[in-house]
Image (spheres, grey):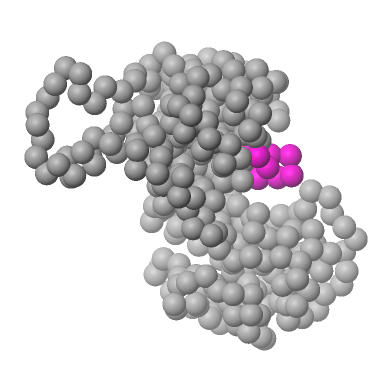
Amino acid sequence: MSAHKPQILVTRRLPASIEARMATLFETDVNEADVALTSEDILEGLTGKDVLVSTITDRIDADLIARLPQSVRLIAQFGNGVDNIDLEAAWAAGLTVTNTPSVLTEDTADMATALMLALPRRLVEGTQMLLREGEWAGWSPTSMLGHRLRGKALGIVGMGRIGTAVAQRARAFGLNIHYYSRNRRPPAVETPLDAHHWDDLDAMLEAVDIVSLHTPLTRDTHHILSAERLGRMKPGSYVVNVSRPELVNEPALISELESGRLAGAALDVFENRHGINPRLLALASDNRVVLTAHMASATLEARVEMGEAVIVNIRAFMDGHQPPHRLLPDQPQPRSARG
């Protein structure tokens, strides 16, 4: 590493051990308030900086990218998802963009599995009943009846690292594994899971009891669970989403749940830019939806590993090497020179 320490802006607070390492390696400016910065705040904080360490709460669109100081050459995202960054605009501006993949697999799969259990077994509802009533009336043969997981069909949309990890956990609970993915997995993956591949998503949705989403957000996957596809799902089935809210047509999902055609949904991600939809909150209050606060990757271990990946990306880039987690747009545009 050169004698000149890279100057970086970190837009949110990170684990203490990561902030300490960054402070040793870089000239680091951290957003101590730990609230989402506005575009103007980001631009002001980047004056004289080399690197922007962003998170999913930062909207880095084409307008912001066009206004970045010439000194900024790297956007090092703290996180796997980068749908908050206009990758095409960054590429055209000559910026390098990195993320932190692979470190979230186990934690995200754990959360998806926990939600699959919580939903049909009414775990949240049972806890709330005790807290609300303050005194348990006692066991009854017909009280709090849910549904068994064993023997049910799980349809995984996106059989990448996380989808495969979910399938492994679900198989241990006796679920039958079905999946739809851009590429069919090899026998070494399918056979131990007894996994059935579908090349027709609509047909899979009609056949399974639980749909769990594990695909990245792209132009092709936006609203992959559209109103029409939600209408194809089996009556009494469930939706689990720990990936991206934009994968689901949320108003259509709400309507299917309100009508009672779908039995429930467990959502770690949902549209909340203007506040959570009151209809969704009402369904949660009525125990037909389980909502968690974007917690799928929220373990200390995952956050530290994410921070370490950010550091590796920055050091590689500033040393003149290709960062290990560099991202490219789907359709790269001609690249322009940048400082």
Question: Residue 80, position in %: x, y?
Answer: 58, 52
Quarter occupied by residue 198: top right
* Foreground pick, 117 / 234: 234
Q: In which quadrant is the C terminus drawn?
A: bottom right
Going 50% across and 19% down the picture, which residue do you hit?
Answer: 235
- Magenta segment includes 97: no
Q: Give the farthest residue toward the right.
A: 334
In the image shown, does 46 or 35 lie closer to the viewer?
35
Relative to 29, 83 lies left or right: right
At horizontal 18% and vertical 44% (from top left) the residue drawn is 132
In the rendered image, which quarter is residue 58 located in?
A: bottom right
Q: Is residue 216 above or below residue 191?
A: below
Q: Position of residue 185 (x, y in %)?
A: 64, 25
Where residue 180 sits, quadrant-wise, is top right
* Residue ID at (45%, 27%): 260
- What residue is drawn where x is 50% and y is 47%? 269
Image coords of residue 157 (percent x, y) = 60, 30
Image side of residue 309 versus residue 169, left or right: right
Q: Which residues are magenta?
A: 215-223
Q: Where the N terminus falls, by quadrant?
A: bottom right
Main secondary structure type of the part rendered in magenta: loop
Residue 333 horizontal/vertical position (percent): 87, 57
